[in-house]
Amino acid sequence: MTDVFTKAKRSEVMSRIRGHGNRDTELALVRLLRQHKINGWRRRCHVFGRPDFVFPQQRVAVFVDGCFWHGCPRHSTHPRTNAVFWTDKIAKNRARDRLVNRELRHDGWVVVRIWEHDMRKPSQPKCLRRLRVALGKSR
């Protein structure tokens, strides 16, 4: 299937996607954390790899990864237009994610990576359990 946008329009659309404040990922987790009274987190802290959420006292770094941008094994799709570029881009994102995980763990952090699809209703309980285990909370 060809792209419905012109090359210029597609470039404009993609350039508007930001690395933080995404409604389907980060802001969904903010709502979930508040709804379940999980506190102690900070956003935009100066920690290697720029985690989306940091629990400084527990040294837990949380990343909410978009299925497209980070190559989710269940939901990732690769555009047919400029396929080589996108395959390379997503592979580099995944390699960077592995490096960040390794460095943070080496520095004594617990790293939790949550997929965008984990923010949907059916997966939220599992997501909350993972966070609570990482934070050392059994509730």
Image (cartoon, rainbow, N blue to C red):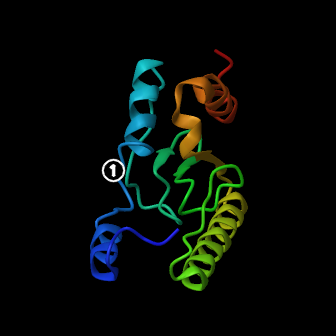
- Residue 43 or residue 113, whichever sits in front: 113
Seen in the picture, residue 103 relative to 110 is either above or below; the reply is below
In the picture of the structure, the residue carrying the numbered disc 1 is 21
- Residue 65 or residue 3, whichever sits in front: 3
* Coordinates of residue 132 in the picture (x, y in percent): 63, 27
- Residue 84 or residue 32, whichever sits in front: 84
Where on the picture, by quarter, is residue 10? Answer: bottom left
Seen in the picture, residue 31 relative to 51 is either above or below; the reply is above
- Residue 101 or residue 125, whichever sits in front: 125
* Coordinates of residue 23 in the picture (x, y in percent): 35, 43
Name the residue rendered at 70%, 30% in the picture.
Answer: 133
Tag 1: residue type? Gly
Name the residue rendered at 54%, 70% in the picture.
Answer: 79
- Image quarter of the C terminus: top right
Where on the picture, by quarter, is residue 32? Answer: top left
Name the residue rendered at 51%, 78% in the picture.
Answer: 81
Q: How many marks?
A: 1
Q: Residue furthest top?
A: 139
Q: Secondary structure at mark 1?
A: loop
* Coordinates of residue 60 in the picture (x, y in percent): 59, 45
For label 1, the crowd category at 10 Å Cα-Cα, with few meaning under 14, some 14 to 19 and many 20 or more, is few
* Coordinates of residue 86 in the picture (x, y in percent): 56, 77
33 sits to left or right of 114: left
Name the residue rendered at 39%, 29% in the picture.
Answer: 31
